[in-house]
């Protein structure tokens, strides 16, 4: 995840906590109820930003689901088979598997030694 998104998530978390503590403190301190209004508005703004982030994440998940269903992500596809898919190409090879490279010298094609 890019650093700006992590920073934004951290700031949003801190903003929610500060607004929540400020709201609760202003309500239980015995002052006028109107003193809690800025904290409540801050909470509503933070929750709105969280809702936008959740909608974005749901849209990205739906997008990748559609790609996987039709095989547009390079996989086999579930509804429409991808004609360019090579069976087994999405599975990792076992450790120390010798790679088949045509016309390569033997010293270039050897398992890695630990």
Image: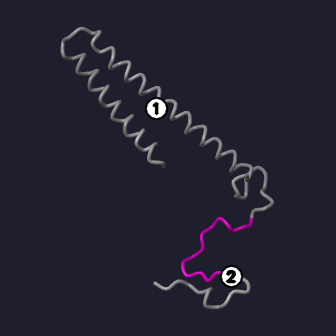
Q: Residue furthest left?
A: 30
Specify the segment rendered in magenta: 86-101
| Element assignment for label 2 | loop
The answer to whether residue 85 is above or below residue 71 is below
Residue 31: where, in percent of width, then height?
20, 11
Whether residue 85 appears in magenta in the rendering, the answer is no
Residue visible at 29% across and 29% down in the picture: 18
Q: In this view of the protein, which residue sits in the foreground, 60 or 9?
A: 9
The answer to whether residue 51 is above or below residue 92 is above
Residue 84: where, in percent of width, then height?
78, 62
Asked whether, in this view, residue 29 is left or right of residue 99, the answer is: left
Q: Which residue is mark 1?
A: 50
**CA distance separating discs 1 and 2:** 49 Å
Asked whether, in this view, residue 54 is left or right of residue 88, the answer is: left
Q: Residue furthest bottom?
A: 106
Q: Which residue is mark 2?
A: 100
Q: Residue furthest right?
A: 83
Way the structure is coloured: one colour
Residue visible at 37% across and 40% down in the picture: 10
């Amino acid at each position: 995840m890019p650093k700006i998104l992590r920073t934004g998530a951290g700031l949003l978390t801190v903003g929610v906590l500060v607004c929540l503590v400020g709201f609760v403190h202003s309500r239980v301190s015995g002052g006028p109820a109107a003193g809690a209004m800025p904290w409540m508005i801050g909470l509503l703004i933070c929750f709105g930003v969280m809702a936008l982030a959740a909608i974005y994440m749901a849209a990205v998940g739906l997008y990748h689901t559609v790609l996987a269903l039709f095989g547009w992500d390079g996989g086999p596809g579930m509804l429409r088979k991808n004609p360019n898919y090579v069976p087994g190409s999405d599975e990792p090879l076992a450790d120390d598997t010798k790679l088949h490279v045509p016309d390569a010298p033997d010293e270039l094609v050897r398992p890695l030694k630990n």
